[in-house]
Image: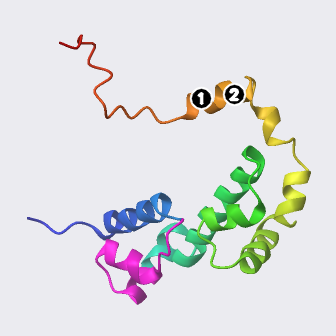
Amino acid sequence: MPPVPTARHLLRAKDLADARYAEPLTVADLAAAAALSPAHFSRRFKAAFGESPHQYLLTRRLERAAALLVSTDWSVADIGVAVGARSIGSFTTSFRRMYGTSPQAYRTARPPAARHVRIPLCVAMAYGRPRNRTFREDTGRAAP
């Protein structure tokens, strides 16, 4: 079997960062997904995508946080935890560095999350409930 090109390995690591950004991923974890040493992986990743693996992961987390600030009413601390920030202070500092404003000011400058919902909240909550049927309610057969 011919070896897989390094670019394919880098995409595998990038996909891992995109899918599991909220988890405590390290450069070593991403390098393992790419089957490369951490140092070689970091050099190749930066050459291919224009930013270091750590910076790429941080960017994904902050982009997701910005989306959550606009689309939810969660607290800034809850959003920081949801996107995998290690501390709220570092999350706020990184957010300010990327967006030029604090997370709270970013949220305040946009319409409230409730404005995005065009249906009554009770309907939105009912629709969002999981539909896991574990009691065979969905079989449609009559009981004997």
| One can see residue 105 in this view | yes
Q: Is 40 within the magenta?
A: yes
Q: The disc labelled 1 sits on which kind of residue?
A: Ala
Q: Which mark is on residue 52?
A: none
Q: Position of residue 88 (x, y in %)?
A: 73, 75
Magenta highlight range: 22-43
Q: The disc labelled 2 sits on which kind of residue?
A: Cys
Q: Position of residue 16 (x, y in %)?
A: 41, 63
Q: Which residue corresponds to mark 1?
A: 126
Nearest to the observer: residue 123 or residue 60: 123
Q: In the image, is 56 to the left or to the right of 39?
A: right
Q: Is residue 14 above or below residue 115?
A: below
Instruction: Tell me the residue at 69%/62% (across/down).
Output: 78
Q: Is 57 within the magenta?
A: no
Q: Position of residue 136 (x, y in %)?
A: 28, 26
Is label 2 in contact with label 1 (beta carbons under 8 Å)? yes
Instruction: Point out the image quarter for the C terminus.
Output: top left
Q: Which residue corresponds to mark 2?
A: 122
Q: In the image, is 125 to the left or to the right of 53?
A: right
Q: Secondary structure at mark 1?
A: helix
Nearest to the observer: residue 10 or residue 75: 75
Q: In the image, is 60 to the left or to the right of 121?
A: left
